[in-house]
Image (cartoon, rainbow, N blue to C red):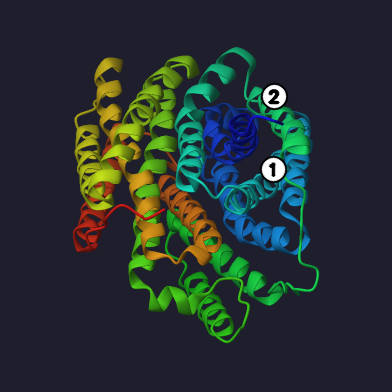
Amino acid sequence: MSNPNKTRLLFITSVALGILLNPLNSSMIAVALSRIQNQFSLSFTEASWLISTYYLASGIGQPIMGKLGDAFGLKKVYLIGLIMIAAASFAAPFSPSFGWLIAIRIIQAFGSSALFPAGMGMIRKSISENQAQALGVLSIFSSVSAALGPSIGGFLTHYWDWKAIFLVNFPFVLAAFFLGLFILPKDRRDRSRKVTIDYIGILLFTMSILSLLLFLLSWESGVNWVELLVSLVFIFAFYKYESKQSQPFINVLALKKNLNMSYVYVQFILVNVIFYSIFFGVPLYLQNVRQFDSKTTGLIMLSVAGFGIIVSPLAGRWIDKRGSKPALIAGTSCMITGSLLLLTIQGSSSAAWIFFSLSVLGLSNGFNNLGLQTALYTFVPPAETGTASGLFMTSRYIGTIFSSSLLGILFGKQFTTSHFHVMAIICVIIGILIMLLTIRMPQLQKQSQ
């Protein structure tokens, strides 16, 4: 195309349309989960595997797909990821059992996991001018799609049942695929450079996360110390093995050496424990305890999305001028305040008051996501941005796994307002821990271009 600005816009759009699919599909399920639970006659703990396995597959899939992109071509892996999503989205509504639905969601998760690392890699290789602005646009697409997911899922489930949350992927997939096919740059891979894939590291990482997940999910019926021991053994083996590799799956020595970077990952895990506990817990509470329909639930959850979207560009300008730390302090303050407001919600509380309480948590989302991502890039050398971005997303998935485990413990057998309040208290405690980590963070200035 002759117009470079138009070409740049189409390039960013084609990547953004793909990147939004993972957070969109991870969050739409929040409102549809109750309907799926009823159709397949499941307890919440059983139904929560639909959440946990998706994030487990995504957390493992992001670094793996990034490695495959380096080895075989970013554009190729990006387009294959879109094809996997399309196939899974078509098959999911025809699932004959809940086990089949989980398997199809895992395929969908691996497909969508290809899009973020491949998309970020192509952006960094092809856009040199105002690169941070382009990365910021992708971050907004990702955050907004995650925030709007419950509202979109609520409307789709209300009018067309849960199967619609899979079919809605097709417009995005088709647009991203055909734009990507013609707009994204051809793969120019240095075939003389040998890229090795750390299969043993991937296996040990998978077993570490899986065993940890099984341990967390066992809390509902009592702590299983054997599963904890198995998890710790796998984690230790993973660390020892990766620390000796020249091309590790995850550079554990860099995490140990760069503590500021590691603390950002820890903060992002904790932020997502709170955020997704709210994202999945509130719709379940509203539908199972308050008996709100999925449409009303989706409208109430729009408060989280709407205020997060409004504050994101304002937070970006603030971060440009003052660095990440002030914005993170503001975001964490909103998170603690919003969690405290959840304690005021009773069986007779109006939808308007619930909407207001959640809107404060929406404000925190706008500050925290962008603030932590900017802080991460301040602590990470430019050459390691791709790997750091993959681990950043993996941190999100780990936080979500923790949140689904927390909800399984609280709501595994029954849904009550008192259980909802216990969730809010836990969120307040985690919020205070996030504030302490934020306070210890060095003052961060605007990242140089």
Residue 240 percent across, percent down from the top left: 54, 85
Q: How many numbered callouts?
A: 2
Which sits earlier in the primary sequence, circle 1 or circle 2? 1
Q: Amino acid at mark 1?
A: Gln
> Dividing the picture into quarters, in which one does residue 274 lie?
top left
Q: Residue drawn at (63%, 39%), measured in percent from left and top?
A: 15
Question: Residue reaching furthest top?
Answer: 159
Relative placement, left or right, of 236 versus 110 is left
Query: Crowding near pointer 2: few (<14 within 10 Å), some, many (20+)?
Result: few
Residue at image mark 2: 171
Q: CA distance from mark 1 to mark 2?
A: 16 Å
Badge 2 element: helix
Badge 1 element: helix
> Dividing the picture into quarters, in which one does residue 299 lie?
top left
Residue 417 percent across, percent down from the top left: 29, 32
Query: Crowding near pointer 1: few (<14 within 10 Å), some, many (20+)?
Result: many
Residue at image mark 1: 108
Q: Residue drawn at (64%, 50%), measured in percent from left and top?
A: 122
